[in-house]
Amino acid sequence: MSQTHVVSVPRSTAHPGAVRIPLREIVPWAVFTTVLALLVLLFVTTEAGAVSVVSDGLVHEFVHDGRHLLAFPCH
């Protein structure tokens, strides 16, 4: 005689159809997104010509409109 196994999936009581995602699966993506956002913010705010990480001006021209959109002066 075969036995039937029932697998239970943890579900939220507030939303009957929602599946809970463990925090340990979210944290690496949250850290990656935060680091990427900070890197973009670094390039938008510091690549202003006088103070720049890359000296050829290519990054400055690439982020120029974004800098003005965020109210950072560049010249």
Image: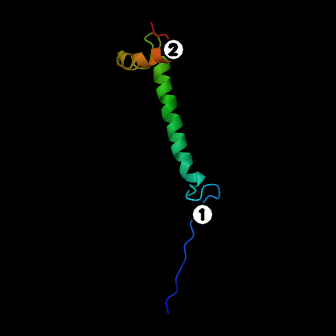
Q: Is residue 35 above or below residue 66?
A: below
User: Would you call the spot at circle 2 few (<14 residues within 10 Å), some (14-19), or many (20 or more)?
Assistant: few
Cα separation, mark 1 vs mark 2, equals: 46 Å
Q: Is residue 28 above or below residue 52?
A: below
**Measured from the top left, where is residue 29 in percent x and y?**
51, 44
**Measured from the top left, where is residue 73 in percent x and y?**
49, 10
**Measured from the top left, where is residue 60 in percent x and y?**
39, 16
- Residue at 43%, 11% (x, y): give it: 49
Residue closest to the far top: 75
Q: In this view, does 42 lie above or below 7?
A: above
In the rendered image, which quarter is residue 62 located in?
A: top left
- Residue at 55%, 58% (x, y): give it: 17
Question: Dot 2 corresponds to which residue?
Answer: 71
The amino acid type found where label 2 is placed reads Ala
Residue closest to the far bottom: 1
Question: Dot 1 corresponds to which residue?
Answer: 10
- Residue at 46%, 10% (x, y): give it: 74
The amino acid type found where label 1 is placed reads Pro
